[in-house]
Image: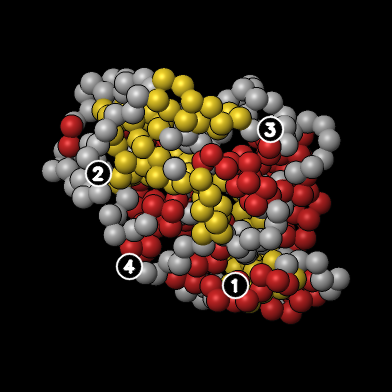
Amino acid sequence: MYDSPARVSAAASPVAPSTVTEAVLPGIVEPDGIQVQTRPAQPAAPGQVVLAMEAAGVSFAEQQMRRGKYYDQPPFPFVPGYDLIGRAVDVGESVPSSVLGRRFAVLTKTGAWASHVSVDVGDLTEVPESVDSADAETFVVNGITAWQMLHRLAKVRAGDTVLVLGANGGVGSTLVQLARIAGATVVGTASAKHHDAVRALGATPLDYRAADLGDQLRALAPKGYDAVFDHVGGEGILTSYRLLAPKGTLVSYGTASTRDAEGSSKAPVLKLLARLTLWNAAPNCKSAYFYNIWAGKRRLNTFRAKVQADLGQVFALLADGSLTPQVAARIPLADVAKAVRVAESGTVVGKVVLVP
């Protein structure tokens, strides 16, 4: 897929870097403890491409990594950054030169908070040139996550009624839009100050702090929800499961309720997985999944094909105007501490994006 003629931006010709600026997590620190450092650049290794970062996301995963609580984060120190949009400025042996100058999205899990990032060529998904880099960045990990949960797990169809917890967040706002495009009716929880934004995306908003939230949710779907998407976890997952229709699907994809809890980072996830396993063994027709974007990576070629296909669908919807990007803020990499504080504040709609 990389042998077509290069489509190089008119803005600049590719230039391999001599130095790399990156944000390093030295340990469990406050946002101001994240260190911005510069090191000599290395040429692209065989089979790899060096991308000049144009946009990188600040997501819940990195917030958990800062606390040392992400399920399988690497040992400190390391460079966080789950995903990015970047333009190819150097290619290694066996990578066609036609890749140079083209813009790509890539899932990295770590390493994206840097001015230049080396990635395997097989992990690249091309970004339409008509799309702004920061706009596209809001739909990389969020878009893949939302698309796969909606279509590969819950298999939401026209006429379904779905519930999205945290409908103002990066994944939540993407879920709302993709579900509406699929023809579903959407109910979304959020704080009251975000209700106008959630309503504008096409969902009915409810205040997640409301004392009678359960009653309100049941009133909007008396027969139950065909799908519930829950990033909160904890004891609230019980309510999400009970809200399902007889053949409904619960998709859990996080444990935000335990963000600040003391103790093992793995315990909340393991407890959640145990619950889902028990529910799936129960004699009913409900389904319960825990979504992990990296599941299936052991079959690398299949994993890559799914990511590229699903992200390609999302980018096509973004390019034709069907999806509205939710960029909460664009903040320079040098001000990464500010970006993390804004992302963790709970005051914004959408995703905080780091830019060069």
Residue flagged by tag 3: what amino acid is it? Gly
Residue identifier under label 1? 197
Q: Nearer the viewer, mark 3 or mark 4?
A: 3
For label 1, the SS is helix
User: In the rendered image, which quarter contains the N terminus?
Assistant: top left
In three-dimensional space, the C-alpha distance between marks 1 and 2, rounded to whole angstroms, equals 36 Å
Label 3 to label 4: alpha-carbon separation: 41 Å
Describe the element under mark 4 as helix, strand or loop: loop
Q: Residue at x 33, y 28 (%)?
A: 17
Give the CA separation, mark 4 to mark 1: 21 Å
Identity, as a three-letter code, of the amino acid under mark 4: Asp
Residue 284 visible to an observer of this rendering: no
Q: Which mark is residue 320?
A: 4
Tag nearer the camera, 1 or 2: 2
- The spot of residue 44 in percent (x, y) is 31, 23
Tell me, yes or no, whether the two marked residues, 2 and 3, touch with CB atoms within 8 Å: no
Question: The residue under label 1 is which amino acid type?
Answer: Ala
For the residues bearing labels 4 and 1, Cβ distance under 8 angstroms: no
**Residue that badge 3 annotates:** 33
- Relative to the observer, which residue lies in front, 315 or 134? 134
Image vertical order of residue 350 relative to residue 18, above or below: below
Q: Quadrant of residue 125?
A: top left
- Res. 281 mark: none
Residue positioned 51% across, 36% down in the render:
113
**Residue 181: image x %, image y %?**
44, 70
From the top left corner, tell me how far across and down residue 86 is, in percent.
36, 42
How many residues crowd mark 3 within 10 Å: few (<14), some (14–19), many (20+)?
some
Badge 2 is on which residue?
12
Which mark sits nearer the N-terminus, 2 or 3?
2
